[in-house]
Image (cartoon, helix red, strand yellow):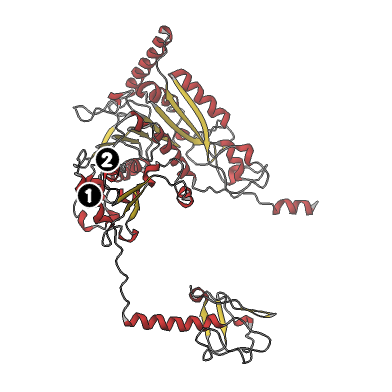
Amino acid sequence: MNQILAEEEAQPKVANVTFNPSLWLQRRTWVLNQLREHRATSVVDLGCGEGSLLSVLCQPASTIPPKTAVECNEPTLDIHISRLIGLDIDDESLKIAVEETAPPPTDRLDDLPPWERPRPRWLDLDVQIWKGGLEVLNEGESGNEGRWFGSNTGEWDAIVSTEVVEHLPNSILPHFIPTTLGVYKPKLLLLTTPNYTFNQLFTAPGVANNLTGYPDPTGETDRVFRHHDHKREWTTEEWTEWCEQAAREWGYDVQVGGIGVSEEEDPWGRTKLVGKASLTAMFKRKELPSDPEERATLERKREDALLAARRRTTPISSHQLLATHHHPAHSSIGSKPTQSALINALKQVLEPAGELGLRNGAADVDELWLQDSIAILCGGDLDVLLNAIEAASSDEWELSKDDSNDLARQHFIPSWREKKWAWRVRWKGFVKPPTPEPPESEKEDEEAEYRWRSTWDGWKGWDNDDGWGDDEVREDGEAEVHSSPPTSPNPEEIKEGEAVSDGWGVAPADDWGLTESWNTSGWVTEEATWT
């Protein structure tokens, strides 16, 4: 009996659960993918915290927005944001959010290296940071410039609220869905929250989760949560029911899913039973019902939600505007360079002294576009660059669109990346400069290194009774083998990662790539190479 108890005590009580990429990054990726897929241009982040998502959305897109319906349906990495709002209640977090969303300084840009300079922006961006609760209505500031939060209800492309709803007290949570879906009515609402069922993986079966978590602070359940401020954590079934009810009530479709699988396999076989670490929900606004009665019912519910939100909004509880930022677009938008001007700019980038001079006159389209001089000359329109290259003389320029035979590039390019970024541009007129003759001092260094390497390369190990010295190396790098092996070293004196040889002393293995080592059976040797 005592042995059984001892074995149970020896079992680990807490399991190792890690994520790769980090769970927060997987949530961020999910949000960005949805915004990208649905071509969101205006986004509200409810519970924005320090503005980590906002700062990402402030980054300029690589090109101007799509110009045609066909382009809008093409895959893209860009998110073209023109309006952005962050809302939170924490003062310290909001101070950071204000800084993170501010335009970059424009003074002394020329003093910065190219990789630290902000990229050109091809769409004006306006940002507002607000302080206030989720349950009250924001109808904007008085005047003409501030009224584009609540005053444009129904015009927002997306509202995002990640890892927020689990923090809302019972006095606020019932107002969250009516305010977001009933009053603001975004085209898209993106939510994430912890999956309570997943918490089982943090401890061994039958072990209370309070070893790693926090008991329900509301006292309404006996559950143990992941964070001390969580007021609830849903199971997958509870989350699905809550989201589907909200969607039915407010005229939305909803897709419920999950994010995050532990890198480690659960020792007790529960991995597939608990689902993902974070639950997700994507609400998409539907068209108004065609049935007049259903349509009137939904519109009446929305009007009631608006009136209720206004009643909850008082001078004390109303939102406070902390900052307004304007990120202006580059002045070159819409410019159309001449054919010769653009070709000359390409030559300057690809010539030996240019930014891409080491590419031997060839570069991918995305490499060329990363040169601000090219992107600005094209006014942010990638088609201007591609059309100019295609129209250029075929004797001088080549635009290769077929990478089907290049397996390395196929592997490198993600499936969702636009293929045109990987098209290859080649300047046929590129002339590679001759390799300059190295100075005499470098030649002497190279000869000394060759002799040093040749000596080591000549050591092929010890045969039955033969060894050699460093002064007995033939011109071809092989050694005359005639002397006795060196005295066997004491294995305890040999440091890990080092090689020992008679007459050579100790040489670090990471310098010479030496593979000579000593064990109880004698020398174990392989050919040494310089690393």
User: Is residue 365 among the parts visible in the rendering?
Assistant: no
Residue 428, position as x, y percentages in the image:
31, 55
**Camera-nearest residue between 52 and 137:** 52
User: How many discs mark residues in the rendered view?
Assistant: 2
Q: Which callout, 1 or 2, points at the residue further toward the start of the chain? A: 1
Q: Is residue 262 left or right of residue 174?
A: right
Label 2 residue SS: loop
Q: Amino acid at mark 1?
A: Pro
Q: Residue at x 61, y 49 (%)?
A: 15
User: Quick one: which residue is furthest to the front in this view?
Assistant: 395
Q: Is residue 263 left or right of residue 522?
A: left
Q: Amino acid at mark 2?
A: Asp
Q: Residue at x 29, y 40 (%)?
A: 383
**Camera-nearest residue between 194 and 430:** 430
Q: Is residue 520 left or right of residue 314?
A: right
Position above or below: 476 against 109: below
Residue 245, position as x, y percentages in the image:
50, 21
Q: Which mark is residue 381?
A: 2
Q: Are marks 1 and 2 in contact (CB under 8 Å)?
A: no
Residue 478, position as x, y percentages in the image:
55, 84
User: Is residue 127 among the parts visible in the rendering?
Assistant: yes
| Mark 2 Cα-neighbour bin, 10 Å: few <14, some 14–19, many ≥20 | many
Q: Residue at x 58, y 43 (%)?
A: 210
Position above or below: 64 against 107: above
Residue 488, position as x, y percentages in the image:
64, 86
Q: Is residue 145 left or right of residue 310?
A: left
User: Quick one: which residue is furthest to the top in this view?
Assistant: 293
Position above or below: 464 against 148: below
Label 1 residue SS: loop
Q: Provide the residue designation for mark 1.
A: 105
Q: Residue at x 63, y 47 (%)?
A: 265
